[in-house]
C-alpha cells in the first residue's frame, strides 16, 4: 500500500492592511454600542472579545504541518481522521490558492477538513483515496465565498 506524506502551511495567509484592522474595530465598536443601547451588555462583550480574537488570528502566521495519508486514514499533524469517520473527499485543483484536499466528515461539529496539497502526485493520491472513500464534488457555500472575499 502506498502512503503519501507532505508538509504544508495550515492555511493560506493573506497579509492584512492597517485599514482592515480599523474596519474590524469600527464594525465591532458600532455593533457593541448598538447592543448596549438595546440593553444587551453580554452580547456587546461577546462582540468585543470576538473581534479581538479575530484580529489576533488574522495577524498570526500559519505554522507548517505534516500531512500523512495511509491505509488507516488521513493524519494532519497529530490528528488522525480514519476513513470510517469520513463520508467523502474532493480534490479541488482549481482553487485560487492552489490544490487542496477537502474531507467531508460524518461528525456534525467539524464537517469539513480542508488541507492544502503540496504533493506532486495528485493523480495517484486521488486514486488511493477513491479506493477508500467516494469522490463527491464539493461546492463552497456562499458564506465561505464571502469569508474568502474579505480575506479570512
Image (cartoon, rainbow, N blue to C red):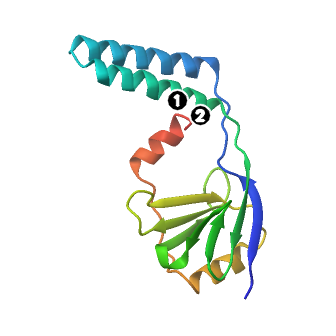
Residue in the foreground of this view, choosing between 58 and 79: 79
Q: Residue at x 71, y 72 (%)?
A: 122
Q: Residue at x 49, y 21 (%)?
A: 24
Q: Residue 26 in the image: x percent, y percent? A: 45, 14
**Mark 1: few/some/many CA within 10 Å (<14, 14-19, 20+):** few
Which label is found at residue 117?
none
**Mark 2: few/some/many CA within 10 Å (<14, 14-19, 20+):** few
Which label is found at residue 57?
2
Quick one: SS at disc 1?
A: helix
Q: Tell me: 115 left or right of 48.
A: right
Q: Tell me: 134 left or right of 98.
A: left
Q: How many marks?
A: 2
Residue position for label 1: 53
Q: Tell whether label 2 touches label 1 (CB within 8 Å).
A: yes
Residue 60 picture quarter: top right
Residue in the foreground of this view, choosing between 19 and 41: 41
Q: Residue 57 in the image: x percent, y percent? A: 59, 34
Q: Tell me: 38 left or right of 13.
A: left
| CA separation in Å, label 1 and label 2 | 6 Å
Residue 15 picture quarter: top right
In this rendering, is residue 60 above or below 138?
above
Indicate the quadrant containing the C terminus: top left, top right, bottom left or bottom right: top right
In this rendering, is residue 85 above or below 114?
below
Q: Residue 68 in the image: x percent, y percent? A: 71, 69
Q: Residue 33 in the image: x percent, y percent? A: 33, 12
Quick one: SS at disc 2?
A: helix
Q: Residue at x 51, y 77 (%)?
A: 135
Indicate the quadrant containing the N terminus: top left, top right, bottom left or bottom right: bottom right
In this rendering, is residue 18 above or below 106?
above
Amino acid at each position: 500500500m502506498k502512503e503519501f506524506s507532505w508538509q504544508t502551511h495550515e492555511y493560506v495567509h493573506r497579509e492584512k492592511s492597517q485599514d482592515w484592522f480599523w474596519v474590524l474595530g469600527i464594525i465591532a465598536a458600532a455593533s457593541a454600542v448598538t447592543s448596549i443601547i438595546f440593553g444587551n451588555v453580554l452580547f456587546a462583550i461577546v462582540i468585543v472579545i470576538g473581534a479581538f480574537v479575530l484580529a489576533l488570528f488574522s495577524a498570526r502566521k500559519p505554522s507548517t504541518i505534516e500531512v500523512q495519508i495511509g491505509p488507516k486514514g488521513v493524519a494532519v499533524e497529530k490528528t488522525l481522521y480514519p476513513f470510517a469517520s469520513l463520508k467523502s473527499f474532493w480534490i479541488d485543483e482549481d482553487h485560487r490558492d492552489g490544490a487542496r484536499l477537502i474531507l467531508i466528515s460524518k461528525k456534525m461539529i467539524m464537517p469539513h477538513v480542508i488541507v492544502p496539497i503540496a504533493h506532486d502526485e495528485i493523480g495517484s493520491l486521488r486514486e488511493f483515496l477513491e479506493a477508500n472513500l467516494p469522490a463527491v464534488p464539493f461546492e463552497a457555500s456562499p458564506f465561505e465565498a464571502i469569508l474568502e472575499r474579505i480575506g479570512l
